[in-house]
Amino acid sequence: MSLDSWQRKAQTGRDILDKSIPKQWLLPESQLPPAMQKNLNFATEFLADEAIARARELDQHYKQTGKLVGPLVSQSPGELVE
C-alpha cells in the first residue's frame, strides 16, 4: 500500500469517526492528557496495516478449519461462544 493510499484511507477513517460520535460526548483535545492523545493516535492511525493482516490470517484460519480463534460474545449477555 502506498503512503498516499494509506493517508487517504486514514483520513477517510478519521472522517467517519468524527461524524459517528455525538459532539457533546467529545472533550476538546486541549483537555485530554498528552499521553492520551499520543495513544489514541497510535491505535487509530498506525496499526491499520497490522489489523488488516491479522484479519486476513483469521479469515484464512476460518476458511480452512471452520472454527473461529478465541471466544466470542453470544447474543445472550454474559454467555461466551467457544
Image: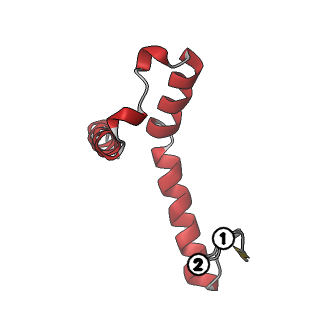
For numbered disc 2, what is the local secondary structure? helix
x, y percentage for residue 78?
A: 71, 69
Residue 62's mark? Answer: 2
x, y percentage for residue 42?
A: 51, 32
Please name the residue shown 56% across and 24% down the image.
36
**Which residue type carries mark 1?**
Pro
- What colouring method underlies this structural image? secondary structure
Q: Quarter-wise, where is residue 61 in the image?
A: bottom right
- Label 2 Cα neighbours within 10 Å, binned few <14 / some 14-19 / many ≥20: few
Cα distance between the residues tagged 2 and 1: 24 Å
Question: Which of the two residues, 33 or 71, is positioned nearer the viewer here?
Answer: 33
- Label 1 Cα neighbours within 10 Å, binned few <14 / some 14-19 / many ≥20: few
Q: Nearer the viewer, mark 2 or mark 1?
A: 1
Residue 66's mark? Answer: none
Question: Which of the two residues, 45 or 35, is positioned nearer the viewer here?
Answer: 35
Quick check: 14 above or below 53?
above
Question: Which of the two residues, 40 or 59, is positioned nearer the viewer here?
Answer: 40
Q: Is residue 39 left or right of residue 48?
A: right
**Which residue type carries mark 2?**
Tyr
The residue most toward the bottom is: 66
Residue 77's mark? Answer: 1
Q: Is residue 19 left or right of residue 80?
A: left
Q: Is residue 52 left or right of residue 58?
A: left
Query: Of label 2 and label 1, which has the lower sequence position?
Result: 2
* Count of marks, rendered view: 2
